[in-house]
Each structure stands twice: as structure tokens, then as C-alpha cells.
Image (tube, coloured by chain):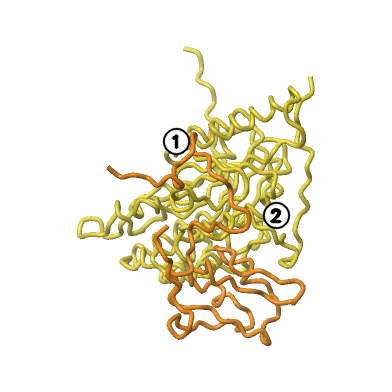
Chain colours: A yellow, B orange
């Protein structure tokens, strides 16, 4: 029985001039001016090329783009519920495998890309995403992280940083810092709990060549892959829309975001600054952190420092010895 | 009751045609307040504006060897002017232009 395997080898991009010119996420969509998620969608669609199927769990990139009868996707795209992005990606991939095996479809297995927001991948959609990684489907799951449920009016999500002012965590006399909890770490969640996963990386819109190369690497491997992409949101984070790239760069320079890739059990870091700037410089540009006091900023700095000591490397937990038989 | 015109009816299964180079049903050019204006002499084709535009409104014209702006869809976020390495892009108020503020004939 012939098994459909991906034989494609998308070449890596060396320079910004060599980025392909074809657009598969065309102009004419309803996202806000300066939208970070729209920018990463454009770059991902360029990197993936024409032989691609996009799946859009509910989120900004579905609600704002797929308005009545008009979608900006020049490649096949389907809406899925926010809970089941990973499950639909698994089904689409399995259906193409069967069609190719039975000889009803010619050509290469398409790149199945599930473009979920932070809520659709690590909050509401976590079980479907985890199941896709566990079963080992040949699909790419992308979590574009704008750190809130932005299309419903900036509600807090598990990846919202400490101290954010969101609709669900407004600062007040009782809780002066706004959000009290520290965020989840999606790539570590995927690496730590899914033995079938082949490639995990984090990327940022500030480094487009690096982002596109990571998408191509993730599509070249046979098996599930996960990408976590930092995408600043001018509306939700309350900054001027022309500063999207500036904020994304500052996040890397201050250590709020780390660029790394994980393949075959090894970590590789990209664009790591020689010296990290204080977190304050990143926080002061954004209106969502405007209410923070010195004590809160120090707490955020301590969290980032603890993370940077071993960015991306899981902490070794001592395994307790098996209990002696009574 | 809200009646949908015949040509705007959603087909069975909500399958809609995919756009090829632009989605003409959502023209966003009338959103902008400021317009990026390029000085072609200062431009060194670093491609920052082409890569960083979320709406793909800057494209490289290889024959002319210059970047071309798409007035129909530019939302005026000015990421391009902020990221320009040679300061070839400047922001100009939209109402200063003769053809400023593109109005749609009817809502989409």
C-alpha cells in the first residue's frame, strides 16, 4: 500500500530581497491598521506557497478577515470552531492521505496549516491541538500570539502578560496591577508533553526572514510541528499603529520574547541580544501597562530574569523514587 | 425581515470564490488619515516597506526598479514610514491631496 509522504523541500530564504513576490493573503481585509497578526499571516502564506490549505479557528484572523462573502485568502481556507482547530486539521490531513492512497488525487500532499490565535491554541482549543500533536498528523499548527482575545474586546487569555489592563482584568483599588497571573508557555507545553512532535519554534514579526524560514522548516518535516509567533496588536496593547515592528523588536531586546527552535531534542537560539534591556522600556510604550507601579515592574523583571537564565530549557524535576512495597 | 439581494446570496455550504490578487469587496483605502509618500531618489530598495506592510500595499516593480504604493487598500498605518531605513517615506495628511479620502459609492 502506497503511503503518501511529503517529498517537498522548500528552500530557505537567505536575504530580505529573496522573499517571494506572490501574495496568497491578498489586500482587502478588515483587520485594523498596523495589525501584527495580519502581517504574520501574509508572511506565513508567502512562505507556504500555493499548495496549502489554511484552517481558521475563530479569532481575529477569522472574524476580521472572513466578512460576509469576501475572504482575502487566495488558497483554500476553511473556518473551524475555536475549540476544534487541531481536530479539523487532523481530519483534512487524513482525508488527503486517503485520497492520494486510493489514487483519486494526483500530486503532493498539501501543507495543512491551522492558524489559531492564542485562545484557539492554548486556552479553548488546547485539547484539539494537543490531540493533533499526540496522533502525529503531518500538519503545522501556528499560534499567533496577540496576548488577548482581541476581536471580542480585549479579554484576558492565558498568554496575556502579568500586569495587563484588559476588559476582564481592569486595575482598581483592590487589584492595582490588573492581571495577577503569569502567562503560560505554549512551546514548552508542546515540547514537554508530546513525543510525536517533530519541530517547535518561536518567531516574531520583527524578523520576517527568520519567521519564513521557520515556517518552511516546519513544513518540510514529516509530522506535527508547532510555531508560536509574536504578533503585536495596536488596539489591544494600546500603542500607535505605526510602532508594531518597533514593539516586536523591543520584546526580543528586553527578553519578554525569546526566539528559538527545537528540533531532535536540541535548542537553537536566534537573534539573541548580547545584553538585555530593562523590561521597563517595553512596558512604558504600551497603554495596557500604564497603571503599573515600581513594585509591579520589579515583579515582571524578576519573572523575565528567571526565564532568561535558561530560556526554553525545561527545569529538571527530581523524579521521586518508587514507593517501597508495604 | 432582512432580505438579501440575489447577487449577495451565500451559496450552499458557504463556499465563496477565492480572490486572486485583491479582494474587491472590501476596499480599505478610505480608512486612512495620513498617506505615506515616497521620495524615489532617497529610496535604496531595502524592501522593509514591502515586507512589513500587513496589507501588501507596497510591491516591487522589477522593470522600473522601484517600489509602488497601492492607494486602493492602504489603511495608513505608517509602519512603512516608521521602518524606512533612509527616510524616503514621509507622512502627508490625506486631505491635502486632490483625490484624498476615497469614498465608496455604496457600502459593501
Which quadrant of the structure image shows residue B46? bottom right
Q: Chain of mark 1?
A: A
User: Position of A89 compared to A22: left or right?
Assistant: left
- In the depicted view, which residue is nearer to us: A11 or A32? A32
Instruction: Find residue A252 and report its horizontal and vertical position in percent.
Output: 56, 63
> Which of the numbered marks, if any, corresponds to residue A213?
2
Q: Chain of mark 2?
A: A
Instruction: Find residue A4 and report its horizontal and vertical position in percent.
Output: 75, 29
A149 lies above or below A139: below
Instruction: Find residue A146 and report its horizontal and vertical position in percent.
Output: 46, 55
Residue highlighted by disc 1: A83
Q: CA distance from mark 1 to mark 2?
A: 28 Å
Residue at (54%, 76%) from the top-left corner?
B82
Q: Secondary structure at mark 2?
A: helix
Which quadrant of the structure image shows residue A204? bottom right
A326 lies above or below A177: above
Amino acid at each position: 500500500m502506497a503511503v503518501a509522504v511529503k517529498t517537498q523541500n522548500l528552500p530557505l530564504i537567505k536575504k530580505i530581497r529573496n522573499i517571494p513576490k506572490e501574495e496568497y493573503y491578498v489586500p482587502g481585509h478588515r483587520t485594523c491598521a498596523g495589525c501584527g497578526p495580519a502581517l504574520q499571516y501574509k508572511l506565513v502564506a508567502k512562505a507556504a506557497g500555493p499548495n496549502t490549505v489554511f484552517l481558521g479557528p475563530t479569532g481575529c484572523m477569522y472574524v476580521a478577515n472572513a466578512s460576509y462573502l469576501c475572504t482575502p485568502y487566495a488558497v483554500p481556507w476553511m473556518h473551524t470552531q475555536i475549540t476544534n482547530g487541531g481536530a479539523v486539521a487532523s481530519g483534512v490531513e487524513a482525508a488527503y492521505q486517503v485520497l492520494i492512497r486510493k489514487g483519486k488525487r494526483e500530486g503532493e500532499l498539501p501543507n495543512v496549516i491551522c492558524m489559531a490565535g492564542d485562545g484557539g491554541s492554548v486556552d479553548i482549543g488546547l485539547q484539539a491541538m494537543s490531540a493533533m500533536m499526540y496522533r502525529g498528523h503531518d500538519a503545522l499548527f501556528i499560534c499567533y500570539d496577540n496576548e488577548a482575545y482581541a476581536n471580542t474586546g480585549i479579554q484576558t487569555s492565558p498568554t496575556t502578560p502579568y500586569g495587563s489592563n484588559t476588559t476582564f482584568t481592569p486595575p482598581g483599588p483592590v487589584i492595582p496591577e490588573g492581571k495577577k497571573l503569569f502567562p503560560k508557555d505554549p512551546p514548552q507545553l508542546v515540547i514537554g508533553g508530546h513525543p510525536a512532535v517533530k519541530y517547535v519554534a518561536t518567531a516574531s514579526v520583527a524578523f520576517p526572514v527568520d519567521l519564513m524560514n521557520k515556517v518552511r522548516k516546519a513544513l518540510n518535516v514529516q509530522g506535527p510541528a508547532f510555531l508560536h509567533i509574536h504578533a503585536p496588536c495596536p488596539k489591544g496593547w494600546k500603542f500607535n499603529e505605526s510602532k508594531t515592528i518597533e514593539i516586536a523588536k523591543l520584546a526580543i531586546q528586553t527578553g519578554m520574547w525569546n526566539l528559538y527552535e527545537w528540533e531532535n531534542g536540541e535548542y537553537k537560539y536566534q537573534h539573541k541580544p548580547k545584553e538585555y534591556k530593562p523590561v521597563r522600556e517595553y512596558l512604558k510604550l504600551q497603554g495596557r501597562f500604564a497603571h503599573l507601579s515600581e513594585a509591579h515592574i520589579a515583579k515582571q523583571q524578576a519573572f523575565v530574569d528567571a526565564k532568561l537564565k535558561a530560556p526554553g530549557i525545561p527545569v529538571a524535576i527530581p523524579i521521586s523514587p518508587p514507593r517501597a512495597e508495604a | 425581515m432582512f432580505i438579501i439581494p440575489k447577487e449577495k446570496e451565500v451559496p450552499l455550504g458557504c463556499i465563496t470564490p477565492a480572490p486572486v490578487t485583491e479582494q474587491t469587496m472590501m476596499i480599505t483605502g478610505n480608512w486612512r488619515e495620513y498617506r505615506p509618500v515616497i521620495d524615489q531618489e532617497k529610496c535604496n530598495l531595502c524592501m522593509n516597506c514591502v515586507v512589513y506592510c500587513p496589507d501588501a500595499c507596497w510591491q516591487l516593480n522589477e522593470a522600473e526598479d522601484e517600489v509602488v504604493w497601492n492607494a486602493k487598500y492602504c489603511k495608513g498605518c505608517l509602519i512603512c514610514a516608521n521602518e524606512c531605513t533612509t527616510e524616503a517615506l514621509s507622512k502627508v495628511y490625506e486631505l491635502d491631496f486632490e483625490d484624498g479620502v476615497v469614498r465608496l459609492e455604496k457600502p459593501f
